[in-house]
Amino acid sequence: MQVTANGRLFSNILKQGIFTIPNFQRPFDWDIEQVSEFLDDINENIDQNYFIGHMVLTYPEHKNKYSGLTCYSIIDGQQRFTTITILLCVIRDIMHHRHKNQELKEAINRYLYTWDNDNNELPVLETEVPYPIFQQYIQTYVQESEKEDLINSIENNKFKNFISKIDIKNESELKLLKAYNYFYSSLKDFDLDRLKKVRDTILALEVVFVEVEDLVSAHSVFMTLNAKGKDLTFIDLIKNHIFSKYDKTKKPAQPNYLEEIWKEIFSNIQSGGREEFFLAFWKSRYTPTVSREKFYKEYMQLAGNKQEKFDINAFVENLYNDSNIFCKITNPNMDDWIDTNCPKKIKIYFHLRYLINFLDATKLSYPFLLALLRCFNNKLIDINNLLSALNILEKYVFINNILYLKGTAGLNKVFPKYALKLFSAKKKTEVHAVINDFINQMRNKVEPYNEEIIDRNISKRIYYDRNSKKEEDKIAKRLARYCLERLEWRKQNNNFSIIDISIEHIYSNDTASSLKNASDIDKIKTIGNLVLLEKTINSKIPNDYSEKREIILKESNLFLAKEIFSKHESWGISDIDDRNRKMSKEIYEMFE
């Protein structure tokens, strides 16, 4: 392994070529606390030498991409390199916008940009991760209109309004803009001499510049330098171990295969959370009680176990395959489950949608769901057993957590236990035995029907207050829609469209003010006064009950709405009370 390590000033590093952050690296993740601490360190070390540690770099495979320029890939140090670049951009922009000093602005630009042999201007820091925000609003010159919009928003204390209007694709882009805002707000009132001292301190930062010949060697150096894992997540450490040990000679032996598959894994698990995925993956395959703090240690015990002959390439493939399943769990999409050869598969979508989007199913269930759908993909479980398991899980979460407020005590062991049993089962008969055991155990845990408790908690937790924006009322509306959808789904034998459906108050919310009794007004928002309606119908129905009834009976295809309006020629508070009483039992029994 050929490694060179030299002390460099950051100004010299910026003159060495192009620096690329590979797409498999962790996105920009510094919060304001870390950004402010870095700026404090700079201000406290004005006119002094300040050492900021090491950076590990390697020549990427596209080193001849730019004529006449050396290109590096940053393996360790991308957070600091990005932060310093943002800070230099801010100083450049303040010098131009506030101090109207074109020469000083151009002087800084000569560190932020470089030129190839064809005189093409290129940013010194390049990100393979698609960061349009970084290039569009931070690196670009001040005279660009979008940059002016950003600066003006900060100058006029309207930054929050600015970020609400632009297309921010992820949390990393938001953190980039927040870092820029913090630096600009902190430095904008500095006089020119003070600002130049900050600039000079940044350019004089001392770094150990570690150059390694290839990616595998670079990750080995990274692991050595970060042996204690300080300030790194367990995922960072695992990733760098994988990149240092992965055998690129094995199939599929394709250029950048590992980098590309790692990028796809991270894309798949974005909605559900990276750490949550890795924890669910581990608990569904290896041990049931791993924590974030002990994850890397357990991983290294597995990877270093010579008797088990750990196959790191197979481990990556398992991560990739499970990440696809995890994406379908945490981001339910109807298209994933439409199958003309197996119409029942669409029910999987509804169960996942209800568990994740409506019931906020505890993350403790992720290992079990991952193992369950893995078995289904591997044809070890039939559709009926799968749906039975999902149904009892949904029933348990709704009844025990929503109707009885029981919480999740004990489930941190139950779900991983059955996940591991499913992983260990290699035959259909074994898998079905595990599923039946799970169903029986969960069925025994479901709370029995208690009318008093359920009536009380439904009235407190399941309703629709159209005039409220409070978070608790948004949750109540979501649960109301869940119950109405679930009841409609059962009435129509799981065959109705959820697209373009909205909640309608039977007794109009707009006329509730005419009621004299405060308790009667509160009843308007309860589940007994709610139905689902097609949005095309809901948008044109009047407040008058008779007219509303006529339109709904003529045009709606929803069973519950037609049932209510066909049975009731008029509707009042006593009808709401009667329906509330009936619905508590219907809601409890709405599962298959």
Image (tube, rainbow, N blue to C red):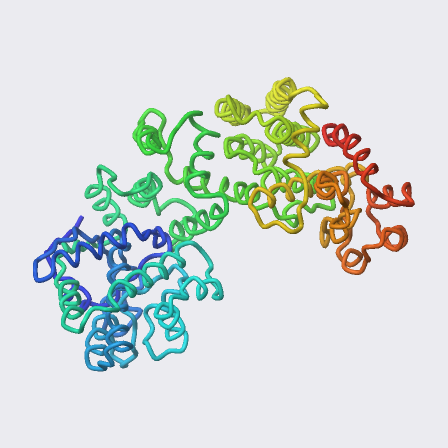
Q: Residue at x 57, y 25 (%)?
A: 406
The residue closer to the viewer here, 488 or 71, is: 488
Q: What residue occupies the far left of the structure in this picture?
A: 48
* 582 relative to 10 in the view: left or right: right
List x then y, in percent, for residue 467.
65, 51
Q: Is residue 372 visible to us here?
A: yes
Q: Quadrant of residue 520?
A: top right
* 424 relative to 585 in the view: left or right: left
- Circle count: 0
List x then y, in percent, for residue 478.
64, 43
List x then y, in percent, for residue 453.
67, 24
The quadrant in which the C terminus is found is top right
List x then y, in percent, for residue 252.
43, 48
Q: Residue at x 20, y 81 (%)?
A: 103
From this view, report whether residue 50 is shown above or below residue 295: below
The residue closer to the viewer here, 580 or 100, is: 580
Q: What residue occupies the far front of the structure in this picture?
A: 516
Q: Quadrant of residue 586?
A: top right
Q: Is residue 136 visible to us here?
A: no
From this view, report whether residue 382 is shown above or below residue 127: above
* 58 relative to 325 in the view: left or right: left
The residue closer to the viewer here, 214 or 19, is: 19
Q: Quadrant of residue 275?
A: top left
From this view, report whether residue 43 is shown above or below residue 322: below
